[in-house]
Every structure is written in structure tokens, then in C-alpha cells.
Image (cartoon, coloured by chain):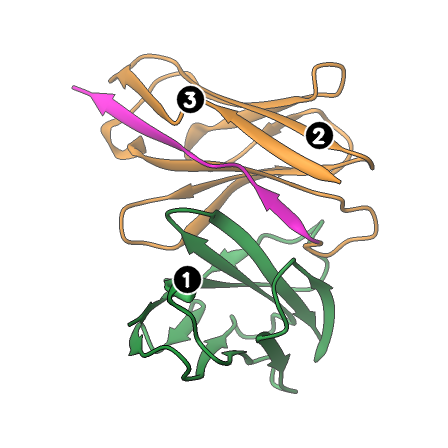
């Protein structure tokens, strides 16, 4: 069974641009979570989607948004990029109920904002 | 509100020695607790998690952690360190009660060095 895939793996953007990152969960998994990892702020939870609905959201500005499609694939979008958005963005999927299921992470998308 | 404190940003142990990585948490609701491992240039891997029930949780790669409510701790241990255990370890807490990876708060991480 294929693991969680994230595309692209690396991305360079300039300030003010917008970016869309994609995450394909493990087949059959309906929950997708997004995280940001930076040297300064560490790991931070962005949001979680389950069956196309945002179930939880972390403390990020409205420039960060996401969605989930009917096939459980998820995208996150960051508009008006800032230098501080440079980070490793991680996606994770789980089958249904996070309390009972193991969560699997993708390799991440490394975003550099110049 | 919830928070996680990992004591020691760097821990060194000799190969074969006990691994002990400390984690204390605060949570206003019964917490779910997690330990993750991150190998260099890789994503995260869930080592183990505590939700309810048995307070001693066994995870992958020989790791285990014990939930101690009175001490608000969830320390990670492994009886004998291997070179392959060298990585960064993150403790995390969520206010889970109805399922789902609810808003998760991570600790700052502990880098484990294993000395041959």
C-alpha cells in the first residue's frame, strides 16, 4: 500500500506570491492533518480535515487555508507569502478516528520564501 | 489551554544504555499524549500514543511511555539504545476526547545522540 505522498517536495517562492501544496493520503484514509515545522517555532498544527470538512484548526492567520476533496486528497494554500512562511509542511493521514488509528506522515514539502 | 515541556534539547546515551526522554504536559481536559520521532531530512513517525486505559503504552522500535497523571508526565523510555535510535523526538498533547487529531501542541523536541 502506498504511503502518504506530498507534492511538490521542494518549492521556492517570493514574498507576496501564493502557493498550493498537495497531499494524497493512504488509500482509504479519510482524515488528513497539516503541520508546519520551522527552526524558530518548531512543530505547529495547522488544520485537520475529515470527509471534506475542517474538523480542527490551529492558530494560524487566514492566509493559511485548506480543503479536502471527495477522494480524501487535500490541499493547503498560503496566500501573500511572507519570509516567515519558509518551513517544512507536513501532511499526515489516518483512517478515521485519530484516537484509535495510527497516523502516517508524508515526507513533507519544503517551502522557501525569498 | 495545553502545553508541553520537553526537558533537555539534547540527550546523549551510550549504545546499550537506557534511553529516557522527559515530557511534562499541561491540559485543561483529559489529554491524549503522543511521542513522535523524526529522522534527519524525513517526516515524522508516530512512536506511540496514550488515549485512555492502560497507562503504560508500548510503541514501535522497543519504546514505551508511561502516563502519570499525578506528575503530569509522559516520559519515553527504551531499555537499550541502538545507533539507529539517533533522531529527534517530539512529545505532543491534544485535548482529545471525542476522537480525531484535535488541535495538537508539540514540544520543542529532544535530539538523541547515541555514542558507540
Tag 2 residue: B26
Residue A69 place in picture, x, y as percent: 62, 86
* Callout 3 secondary element: loop
At x 72% / y 57%, what residue is drawn? B100
Pointer 2 chain = B
Q: Give the alpha-carbon distance from disc 3 to disc 2, as whole Å.
A: 18 Å
At x 42% / y 70%, what residue is drawn? A82
Tag 3 residue: B8
Kindly indicate whether the residues beneath marks 3 and 1 are on one polypeptide chain: no
At x 40% / y 53%, what residue is drawn? A38
Residue B88 place in picture, x, y as percent: 36, 37
* Callout 2 secondary element: strand
Q: Is residue B15 left or right of residue B27?
A: left
Magenta-colored stretch includes residue B106: yes
Q: Main secondary structure of the magenta part?
A: strand
* Residue A108 visible: no
B53 w.r.t. B115: above or below: below
A13 w.r.t. B58: above or below: below
Tag 1 residue: A84
B11 w.r.t. B33: above or below: above
Give residue A60's mark.
none
Residue A25 place in picture, x, y as percent: 52, 72
Kindly indicate whether the residues beneath marks 3 and 2 are on one polypeptide chain: yes
Chain identifier of the orange chain: B
Q: Which residues are magenta?
A: B103-116
The colour one sees for chain A in the rendered image is: green
In the displayed orientation, state which residue is furthest to the bottom: A70
Q: Earlier in the sequence, mark 3 or mark 2?
A: 3
Kindly indicate whether the residues beneath marks 2 and 1 are on one polypeptide chain: no
Q: Quick one: label 3, few (<14), some, or many (20+) residues within 10 Å?
A: some
Amino acid at each position: 500500500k502506498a504511503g502518504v505522498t506530498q507534492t511538490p517536495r521542494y518549492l521556492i517562492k517570493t514574498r507576496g506570491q501564493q502557493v498550493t501544496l498537495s497531499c494524497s493520503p493512504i488509500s482509504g484514509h479519510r482524515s488528513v492533518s497539516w503541520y508546519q515545522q520551522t527552526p524558530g517555532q518548531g512543530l505547529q498544527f495547522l488544520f485537520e480535515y475529515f470527509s471534506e470538512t475542517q474538523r480542527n484548526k490551529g492558530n494560524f492567520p487566514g492566509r493559511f487555508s485548506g480543503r479536502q476533496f471527495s477522494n480524501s486528497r487535500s490541499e493547503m494554500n498560503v496566500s501573500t507569502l511572507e519570509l516567515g512562511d519558509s518551513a517544512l509542511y507536513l501532511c499526515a493521514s489516518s483512517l478515521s478516528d485519530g484516537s484509535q488509528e495510527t497516523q502516517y506522515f508524508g515526507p513533507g514539502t519544503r517551502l522557501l520564501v525569498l | 489551554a495545553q502545553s508541553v515541556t520537553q526537558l533537555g534539547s539534547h540527550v546523549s546515551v551510550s549504545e546499550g544504555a537506557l534511553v529516557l526522554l522527559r515530557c511534562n504536559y499541561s491540559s485543561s481536559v483529559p489529554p491524549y499524549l503522543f511521542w513522535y520521532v523524526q529522522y534527519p531530512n524525513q517526516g515524522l513517525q508516530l512512536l506511540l500514543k496514550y488515549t485512555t486505559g492502560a497507562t503504560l503504552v508500548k510503541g514501535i522500535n522497543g519504546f514505551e511511555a508511561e502516563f502519570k497523571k499525578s506528575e503530569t508526565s509522559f516520559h519515553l523510555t527504551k531499555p537499550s539504545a541502538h545507533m539507529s535510535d539517533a533522531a529527534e523526538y517530539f512529545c505532543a498533547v491534544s485535548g482529545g476526547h471525542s476522537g480525531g487529531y484535535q488541535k495538537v501542541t508539540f514540544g520543542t523536541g529532544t535530539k538523541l545522540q547515541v555514542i558507540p
